[in-house]
Image: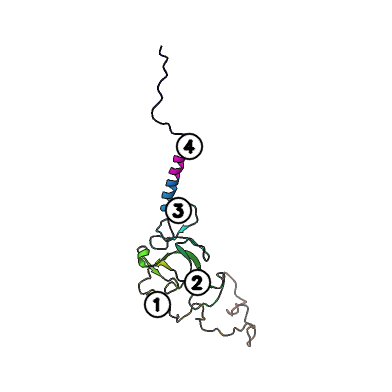
Amino acid sequence: MSLTRPLADASPLRSPRRTALARVAGALALLSAAAGCTPEIGDKCQVSTDCSIRGDRLCDTSQPGGYCTQLNCQGNSCADEASCVLFNSALPGCGYDDRSGPFGSRVARSFCAAVCESNGDCRGGYVCADPRTYPWNAIILDDNQSRRSCLPLPLEGQDAGAALETPKAPVCGATAPPVGPIDASAPRLDGGAPPLFPDEGTPDAGSTDGG
């Protein structure tokens, strides 16, 4: 029987501390990779989960290729790469205020729009423009009023940046002819009251039914 002890493994064993540090480093690497792939305002999308799995962003599918954004934003509340823009801020010819406060228009909605410096910063189908100009006629709610945004290309016949012409027929104006006063008094019956039944002749008293 041999009394010699078996030789220890020459390969160094990993200590629990090194294992924990390696796991933390791996988790940080995964988080960094995930942060680099996080969708931004203005990215293309098909459903809202393409923009955020936390539900804090939505996909505006009415825009070309979808548009990741935030709805009902307030001034200076969007991410650094976006600005808060109020669209449909006024209806042509309607000078009134309602639930949108001083901005008017019942259909006004605010969205976070991707900021840009040139058209090259925007996706295909979008142009880098001042949202306050025609045909968007929006309002920038942020303090910085000089930032431009990636906006959908104007429809054919709409020149971006052109002045908005005054509409000939304001939608809030009176377009129907005036209606005269209505006489609600009782009708006059100069010839007396009308007969209860129309005059169909007096039946012959001597005639009997059945001949």
Write down the residue under mark 4: 17
Give the amino acid type for the residue marked by disc 2 in the picture. Answer: Ser
3 vs 4, front mark:
4
4 vs 2, front mark:
4
Give the amino acid type for the residue marked by disc 1 in the picture. Answer: Ala
Mark nearer the N terminus (3 vs 2): 3
Give the amino acid type for the residue marked by disc 3 in the picture. Answer: Thr
Asked if the residue at tag 3 contacts the one at tag 1, i.e. Cβ–Cβ closer than 8 Å, the answer is no
Q: Which mark is residue 22?
A: none
Location of the C terminus by quadrant is: bottom right
Write down the residue under mark 2: 89
Marks 4 and 2, Cα distance to the nearest angstrom?
Answer: 60 Å
Q: Is 138 covered by the magenta stretch?
A: no
Q: Which residues are magenta?
A: 20-27
SS at mark 1 in the image: loop
Q: Is residue 187 above or below residue 124?
A: below
Marks 2 and 1, Cα distance to the nearest angstrom?
Answer: 18 Å
Write down the residue under mark 3: 49
